[in-house]
């Protein structure tokens, strides 16, 4: 408790499915989910393996609080070696799938090898089977979900699946569960597709037990109250969703616009949370129709949106007239600001397609932004794009591109390789807004300096979810720091990285950390799980996980030289806003960060650090 | 005063804290598949609807039960299943027009909402107020009030 103590191992090459006891010694050192699965991955695969070869493994892992009544306790992660980056990949998702897997009696699924033909895995409690998926191959996420439920006559199954993007080798394909919740980044869906595994369908009836039920109910109730009383988790996120950030970040001069040429977007309001709630032009209805919680979540930041039936994107396409997962901030930024498009319903349509075909909208939008800049410079033209007019700000271009990318048709095939490969191919690697090959998300490090170090050092490539210093630098959580200064940011980034690794390994959503610290998490874990779980122990576990991931990447062939921001951010100053005249001050922060981490000047953990962390 | 679960689906976010609380109260662990209350996700409409037994005054389940295992609690109005008497014939699951009494294969008996003996865990767990435990005779109060406000607003608009 509150691990099930079992993992399911599925070898797709041989079709063998076995149950194994969870390594509880590792669980005590790595907690669960991100940390524990990373340990299994690091132990079981050669870090130099080709990510899309049968030698790579893909792990779906829950945390100890997944499936409990702890607020947001429904998370699971997909861990593998990522094809976009060549680094360790770990993508976290909500929805209901993670809890269902736990109810079925499994802490994680380790998937290895490669099936000869398309298959899907069904799990009904302790009965797991592989089934032919030839008829599902080529189907969308939405159709696959419906088809599997119909086949098993079980509408209560929870399904994680790839879309056509993962089948067609798009390097930033995701795994989508519950129709629109994504293990979104780094191409974890591409790995799943390379294994010919279309989906995992789970139904669990066994439930989850905790160590000390009375104390657990008290601890979770107290923690829920903290979320309800907090302005961000109690009000901002339920009302506006993550999109509450669009106008805030734009005003801070940190909204990367048109491939980060600019740091402010004149169309930001048009694609913001406020705009989603306003009645729109034609049908006088708002884009946003409801907010949705993931399993066990008392915040409920998810957006459910509907496109105007007369909008050009869906005219004569009734299959897109219904409501579905709407724009989150990162997607709205990537599909909108990064491309200069301010048409809210066009962005929502592109987001629907990303969900339906299981495409990471961050990497897609950022890659399209880079392509638009290449087009703007005349390096790409209508001949090379197959007739696409990739003009900044063109909603038509966005829509055509998103329809092509998952299918890997025409120029969509090149877009599907990500911006680093695209820009390198056309001789302009400096135009790729990536770190370690992964597109950075919706915060410009020139206006939020801590995010520069966050992107440069994130173990899965550029990412906001490894140390979200925006919380401190913009929102003042847990305390306000100056977004334009690099002072103290190395320590801030390290502290956030370690704490985040603990959150990500617990089964909880990182968004709780707007209100919770590890002081709120530790009592919940301690009441639920075997062992003694204190704040100090969680920080140590977090730091251990961070260093384990780093070691994996170094063994995979990455070096400190890869902790590098795109040239534009360090050479071209912000043109407007509070950060006007500033570039990203990574050079000052990085050496300080290495030292704080106990790493050499080349970014390698010292023996002393490794032994301190029992690595 | 007889109280009932008053459900305002418009406030539901689909978080399933009610199902978690119900299963914990009744089964001692977190297991939504054994919850007596269920949240339905009408995804294409963006609606979430919690649904459970409304404790009918003249209950189909009670009348159908061949072994009189379902009785009425005088204080709460709850139709409760006596597990010692229930033979698991499932006739009540056929009789109930609402589907809110269900068979539990693990015990061979049927399970249904019993309002937790008068202190329903689902209502306490609901973070948005979509489920409250209130005077059964005033279950429509808030809904009437909202329509009253609209009615009067209309009257004022036409008068002006």
Image (cartoon, coloured by chain):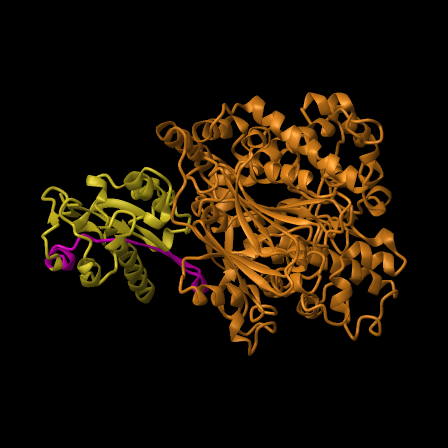
Residue B85 screen position, x and y as percent: 13, 47
Give the side of residue A421 with respect to residue B104, left or right.
Answer: right
Horizontally, is A66 left or right of A189 in the view?
Answer: left
Q: Quadrant of the C terminus of chain B?
A: bottom left
* A339 sits to left or right of A24: right
Q: Colour of chain A?
A: orange
Residue projecting furthest to the bottom: A316
Residue A518 picture quarter = top right
Task: Say left or right for A386 vs B65.
Answer: right
Furthest toward the right, the residue is A427
Q: Magenta span has A374?
A: no
> In this structure image, what is the colour of chain B?
yellow
User: Residue A250: x and y, percent?
Assistant: 67, 47
Which residue is at the front of the view, A233 or A481? A233
Provide residue A151's location: percent of width, then percent of height: 45, 67
Residue A251 appears in the rendering: yes
Q: Residue at x 58, y 64 (%)?
A: A356
Q: Which residues are magenta?
A: B40-63
């Amino acid at each position: 408790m509150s691990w099930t103590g079992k993992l399911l191992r599925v070898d797709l090459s041989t079709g063998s499915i076995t149950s194994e006891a969870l390594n509880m010694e590792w669980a005590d050192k790595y907690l669960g989910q991100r940390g524990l699965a990373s340990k299994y991955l690091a132990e079981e695969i050669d870090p130099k393996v080709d990510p899309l070869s049968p030698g790579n493994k893909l792990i779906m892992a829950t945390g100890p609080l997944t499936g409990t009544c702890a607020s947001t306790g429904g998370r699971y992660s997909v861990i593998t070696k990522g094809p976009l980056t060549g680094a360790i990949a770990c993508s976290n998702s909500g929805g209901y799938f993670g809890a269902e897997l736990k109810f079925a009696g499994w802490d994680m699924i380790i998937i290895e090898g490669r099936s000869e033909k398309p298959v899907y895995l069904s799990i009904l409690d302790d009965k797991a089977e592989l089934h032919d998926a030839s008829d599902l191959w080529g189907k969308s996420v939405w159709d696959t979900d419906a088809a599997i439920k119909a086949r098993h006559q079980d509408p209560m199954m929870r399904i994680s699946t790839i879309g056509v993007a993962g089948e067609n080798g798009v390097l930033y394909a995701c795994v989508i569960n519950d129709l629109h919740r994504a293990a979104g980044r780094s191409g974890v869906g591409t790995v799943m597709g390379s294994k010919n595994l279309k989906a995992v369908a789970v139904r669990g009836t066994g439930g989850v037990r905790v160590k000390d039920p009375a104390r657990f109910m008290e601890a979770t109730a107290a923690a829920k109250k903290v979320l309800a009383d907090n302005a961000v988790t109690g009000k901002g996120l339920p009302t506006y969703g993550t999109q509450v950030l669009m106008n805030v970040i734009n005003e801070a001069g940190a909204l990367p616009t048109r491939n980060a040429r600019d740091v402010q977007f004149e169309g930001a309001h048009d694609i913001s949370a406020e705009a989603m709630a306003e009645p729109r032009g034609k049908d006088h209805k708002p884009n946003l129709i409801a907010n949705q919680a993931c399993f066990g979540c008392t915040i409920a930041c998810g957006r459910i949106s509907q496109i105007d039936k007369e909008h050009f994107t869906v005219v004569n396409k009734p299959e897109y007239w219904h409501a579905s997962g709407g724009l989150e901030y990162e997607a709205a930024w990537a599909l909108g600001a990064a491309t200069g498009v301010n048409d809210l319903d066009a962005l929502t349509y592109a987001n629907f397609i990303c969900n339906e075909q299981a495409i990471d909208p961050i990497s897609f939008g950022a890659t399209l932004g880079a392509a638009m800049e290449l087009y703007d410079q005349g390096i790409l033209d209508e001949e090379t794009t197959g007739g696409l007019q990739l003009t900044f700000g063109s909603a038509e271009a966005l829509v055509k591109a998103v329809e092509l990318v998952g299918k890997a048709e025409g120029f969509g095939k090149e877009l599907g390789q990500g911006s680093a490969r695209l820009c390198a191919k056309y001789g302009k690697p400096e135009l790729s807004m990536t770190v370690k090959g992964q597109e950075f998300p919706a915060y410009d490090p020139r206006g939020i300096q801590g995010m520069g170090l966050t992107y440069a050092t994130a173990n899965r490539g550029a990412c906001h979810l490894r140390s979200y210093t925006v919380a401190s630098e913009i929102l003042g959580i847990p305390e306000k720091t100056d977004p334009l200064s690099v002072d103290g940011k190395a320590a801030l980034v390290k502290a956030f990285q370690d704490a985040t690794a603990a959150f990500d390994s617990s089964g909880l959503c990182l968004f709780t950390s707007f209100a919770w610290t590890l002081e709120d998490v530790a009592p919940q874990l301690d009441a639920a799980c075997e062992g003694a779980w204190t704040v100090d122990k969680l920080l140590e576990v977090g730091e251990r996980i961070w260093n384990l991931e780093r070691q994996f990447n170094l063994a995979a062939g990455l070096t400190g030289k890869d902790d590098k921001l795109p040239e534009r951010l360090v050479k071209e100053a912000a043109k407007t806003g509070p950060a006007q005249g500033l570039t990203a001050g990574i050079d000052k922060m990085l050496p300080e960060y290495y030292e704080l981490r106990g790493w050499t000047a080349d970014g390698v953990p010292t023996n002393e650090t490794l032994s301190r962390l029992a690595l | 005063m007889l109280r009932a679960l008053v459900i305002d689906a418009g406030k539901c976010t689909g978080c399933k804290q009610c199902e978690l609380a119900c299963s914990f109260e009744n089964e001692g662990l977190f297991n939504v598949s054994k919850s007596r209350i269920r949240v339905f996700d009408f995804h294409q409409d963006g609606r979430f609807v919690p649904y459970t037994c409304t404790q009918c005054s003249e209950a189909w389940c009670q009348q159908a039960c061949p072994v009189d295992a379902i009785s009425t609690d005088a204080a709460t109005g709850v139709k409760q299943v006596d597990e010692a008497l229930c033979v698991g014939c499932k006739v009540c699951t056929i009789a109930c027009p609402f589907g809110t009494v269900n068979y539990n294969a693990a015990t061979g008996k049927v399970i249904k909402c019993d309002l937790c003996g008068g202190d329903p865990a689902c209502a306490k767990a609901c973070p948005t107020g979509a489920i409250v435990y209130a005077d059964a005779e005033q279950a429509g109060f808030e809904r009437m009030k909202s329509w009253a406000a609209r009615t009067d607003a209309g009257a004022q608009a036409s008068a002006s």
